[in-house]
Amino acid sequence: MTNVPLSTSDRDLLRQLRRLGAATVRELCESCDVTATAIRQRLGRLESAALVEKEIVRHGRGRPRNCYKLTDNGLQQLGENYAELAQLLWEQLANIDDPGIRGKLIDSLRSAMVERYGSSVDGATLKDRIRQLGAALAQRGADVEIDDREAGEGGLPILRENNCPYHRLAAADGTICELEQSVFESVLDAEVELTACCMDGHHCCEFEVTERSGHEEVSAVSPGSEPR
């Protein structure tokens, strides 16, 4: 599941539904102290995002009621707080004294990332693969552009991340940027250069891609090592 950007009011409604378990529009109006129109608008947005679902509840001979509850995605949306855990895990990797063990763990992490992002990247041309990688990143919540107007060397489009997907990690250790770059190289089977980086004060991260002259082994990356 990708993290869905939510307004404060929509997130508040999700929290209320989590506390109530399931609720009608009227119950949500009372709980949130807003109008039925506002509640229905919020529920509509959350249903479209697959974070809330409606169910019909019948009690005896009375009129059935429409109740709303969180989906599994909705529960995950409220419970996702992986940034701190990811940072702690990365710090622990960096603190492993044995370079052999540290290298194996980083290689395993890199391979998992290549498999995840590369599973839907199989284009015959490098340009196709760049677009497919951009789509794979966007599916996982990244704000990605494939920019043909600023084509890099060889006329290939530039892959641009408008938000850093690893902001906290990169702020503490810039080698996470090298890891991402090496993953992209393997997924695309091409040379990838990070030409702009949010951590260097740019408003985005930009990757220029060029055809690989030979099939060289991508060098391993270790957390805490000197960035290139």
Image (spheres, rainbow, N blue to C red):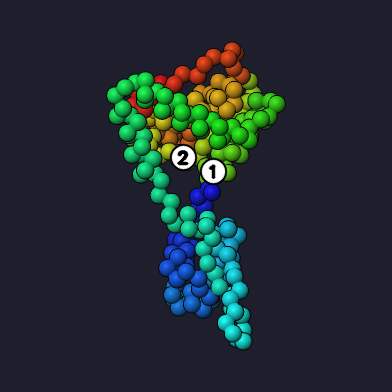
- The circle drawn on residue 71 is none
Q: Residue under circle 2? A: 165
Q: Tell me the residue at 50%/73% (across/down).
A: 23
Say if 149 sits above or below 33 in the image.
above
- Amino acid carrying label 2: it is Pro
- Amino acid carrying label 1: it is Arg
Mark 2 vs mark 1, CA separation in Å: 10 Å
Determine the residue located farthest toward the front in the rendered image.
60
Q: Is residue 163 left or right of residue 85?
A: right
Q: Tell me the residue at 43%/51% (across/down).
A: 80
CB-based contact (under 8 Å), mark 2 and mark 1: yes
Instruction: Count every numbered label the image shows and give the total.
Output: 2
User: Which sits earlier in the primary sequence, circle 2 or circle 1?
Assistant: 1
Q: Is residue 21 visible?
A: yes
Q: Residue under circle 1? A: 140
Say if 95 sits above or below 61 in the image.
above
Q: Is residue 9 visible?
A: no
**Location of residue 140 by image quarter:** top right
Quadrant occupied by the C terminus: top left
Residue 41, x across and y down, in percent: 56, 68
Residue toward you, 147 or 26: 26
Residue toward you, 5 or 136: 136
Residue toward you, 104 or 185: 104
User: Is label 2 or label 1 in front?
Assistant: 1
Q: Tell me the residue at 66%/30% (across/down).
A: 122
Residue 198, x across and y down, in percent: 43, 35
